[in-house]
Amino acid sequence: MIVRHFLQWVRTADAADRAEATRALARAYLYSDLTDDDRIAAEGAMIMLLDDPSPLVRCALAEVLSSSREAPPALLHALVNDLPDIAALVLERSPLMIDSDLVDTVGAGGPHAQACVARRADLPRSVAAAIAEVGTAEACLILLENADADVAPFSVDRIVERYGHLAAIRETLLAFPDLPAATRQALVVKLSQTLAGFVVACRWLEEPRARRVTQEACEKATVILAASSQRADVSPLVRHLCASGQLTAGLVLRALLSGNVALFEESLSELSELPVARVSALLHDRRGAGFKALYDRAGLPVAVYPAFRAAIEAMHESEMLAEPGGAARLKRRMVERVLTSCGSLPAGDVEPLMTLLRRYATEAAREEARLFCDELVTFGARDPLAANYDEIESVAA
């Protein structure tokens, strides 16, 4: 009886009143103690209201029904295919949307629909994977910011691969406290590529020089990243470097010259396909008999072997590894010793190596100078005589 009166009244009411009455009818369907006949009539009336010319009415249905498990599935299916703002309510809230429906929406829907799905609470891993694979940058960013989403590591890597060049994506990912070292390194590469493209487009650097600068910056950042990671995270990082073609002789040599033994051992283990324990035993054998065989098995360039051999000899001297900067920065004395050792070799194939070592020596000297100045300033701040420095300088002037 009530539904019949509603249907008669709704024919002449204005849009705002129809929307408010529709909202009341939907709430009554969900929460009131209706008879079976009244419930069937109410459902039929709501289905009829799907044809209402005013989006306010259909939006009122979506607002009330979208969060309920008791909502008629036919109604929700129709609302999902309505105007974007109306469909968004169902896509974001409805617990009746199954995973396959959401995956199809991500694949066939537009950016707005993808963003709505990415905002869902308790978003399952399969849907998150679909967003990472085909979603827009906005949808992927919303997914990463959704604390309730179950995002697999491979989906994060896929987002990095597709959108790691975007600052918003990088900043969000780098804020993750448990982001794997391999993923952080991939973000570093994306950032360096973006910067290289920018400086080349601005004609600040020629492309070959920009590539060399960014490659060395990536290698430096990778060594720092490995030094700040747990030993268990270094092996996945090395596998990522090897798979992406970044595990070069220059990077391995930089790791050794920085005293980053963990990264150096893991790299040789990956390249030689030998256990890390076996590689470590060969490296720490002061006789050096097995290192040449290990080096050849790893497939590293023959021309660079003298530098590795000299660095291994220096590594056996503990004071070489005790220089400031930890395992994240090149050791100046170690680099200079290797440079001196290789300087006595005949010119020819060794020239590119000497050029690389000279760049390493310059970098190590600059880093050491920075550390020294930082320590000097820190000591000066604690020195009780520091308050008289200005007076001393004025007298000297």
Image: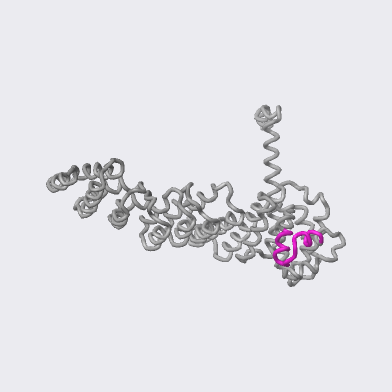
Residue 124: x and y in percent read 47, 54
Quarter occupied by the C terminus: top right
Q: Is residue 204 left or right of residue 245?
A: left
Q: Is residue 166 left or right of residue 89?
A: right
Q: Is residue 76 left or right of residue 375?
A: left
* Residue 355 among those drawn in magenta: no
Q: Residue at position x 68%, y 27% from top?
A: 388
Name the residue nearer the viewer: 49 or 110. 49
Q: Quarter-wise, where is residue 352 in the image?
A: bottom right
Quarter occupied by the N terminus: top left
Residue 272: x and y in percent read 73, 67
Residue 125: x and y in percent read 49, 56
Q: Residue at position x 77%, y 62% from top?
A: 279
Q: Is residue 394 above or below residue 10?
A: above
Q: Is residue 123 visible?
A: yes
Q: Residue at position x 80%, y 60% from top?
A: 283
Q: Residues in magenta?
A: 264-281
Residue 21: x and y in percent read 21, 42
Q: Is residue 319 above or below residue 212?
A: above
Q: Is residue 295 above or below residue 95?
A: below
Q: Main secondary structure of the magenta part?
A: helix
Name the residue nearer the viewer: 255 or 33. 33
